[in-house]
Amino acid sequence: MLDKFKDILKKEEDIIQFKLPRHIALVTKGKKIYAEKHKISIEKVYSRSTLIITSTIASCVKMGVPITTFYLLSTHAEQLEHFSTIVDSLTDFLNNLAEKEMIHKNKIKVSVFGKWYDLPGKLVDSIKNIIDKTKDYDSYFVNFCVNYGGQEEIVDAIKLIARQVKAEKIDAEMVNKEMIKENIYSSYFLAPDLIIVNGSKRTSDLLLWDSPKAKVYFTNKLWPDFDKKELMDAISEYQKSD
């Protein structure tokens, strides 16, 4: 165990010497499969998953990665049989994260992408709370995608632009890629350099508009098994690309 820990620290030191991604996005899939595979409750799996998120944030801050985005909840989540467990877990996680010294010491601004305002009240309140408590920070940025869909993000941006055209504030011929970027949820942020996908090796709809040039790293682990070594491996692979 000690040798493994030393290897991870050595890899971290080596990685920091080279070009780091400015924005890492992570797809946190595989929680239900993990619960079934290990015969443990979905509540315990979600509790474990939130600890991994916190640990990943800490690792990225330590390395100096300025932006980290986590895909936590899709727009279809309300149809899941354990939706209430997800809501409880996310609510507790965000309330606890809002009080963590790591967030305030490192001045981490938390943003939430998606139609989170349509979710149950206690989760909405926890989102509003952490956004408010970190709104003035600007050293690091952590984004959570909640009740989010990449295609819906683009559709909503086009709707906003269409309203401006209808109101004759802009001409239809003025619509371009830059204007769409300005109207998506993640408009203020750099596009991801690295997207890490857990679970099945399928493309994700995370940050669809911003992801064409991102390096995609598929892990061999479900999200509840994700660890610092896997993060280091993904960054190391990114550094090998052009």
Image (cartoon, rainbow, N blue to C red):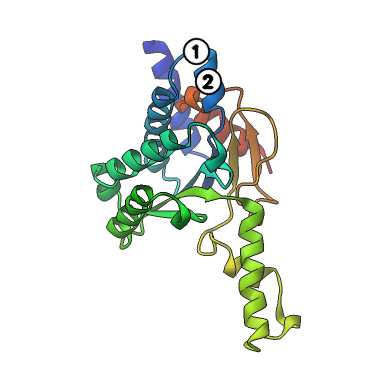
The image shows residue 107, relative to residue 51, as above or below, that is: below
Q: Quadrant of the C terminus?
A: top right
Q: Residue at x 45, y 19 (%)?
A: 7
In the rendered image, residue 56, in percent from the top left (x then y), is placed at 42, 35
Label 2, on which residue?
34
Picture quadrant of residue 168: bottom right
Q: Amino acid at mark 2?
A: Tyr
Task: Tell me if residue 108 can be seen.
Answer: no
Of 121 and 175, which appears nearest the observer? 121
Q: Residue at x 66, y 62 (%)?
A: 155
Q: Are marks 2 and 1 in contact (CB under 8 Å)?
A: yes
In the rendered image, residue 4, in percent from the top left (x then y), is placed at 43, 14
In the rendered image, residue 209, in percent from the top left (x then y), is placed at 66, 57
Of 113 and 43, which appears nearest the observer? 43
Of 154 and 212, which appears nearest the observer? 154
Relative side of 5 to 205, left or right: left
Mark number displayed over residue 223: none
Q: Amino acid at mark 1?
A: His
Relative side of 102 to 64, left or right: left
Task: Tell me if residue 164 can be seen.
Answer: yes
Residue at disc 2, secondary structure: helix
Picture quadrant of residue 170: bottom right
Q: Residue at x 63, y 79 (%)?
A: 163
Relative side of 80 to 125, left or right: right
Label 1, on which residue?
38
Q: Residue furthest right?
A: 173
Q: Residues within 10 Å of mark 2 (few under 14, many from 20)?
A: many
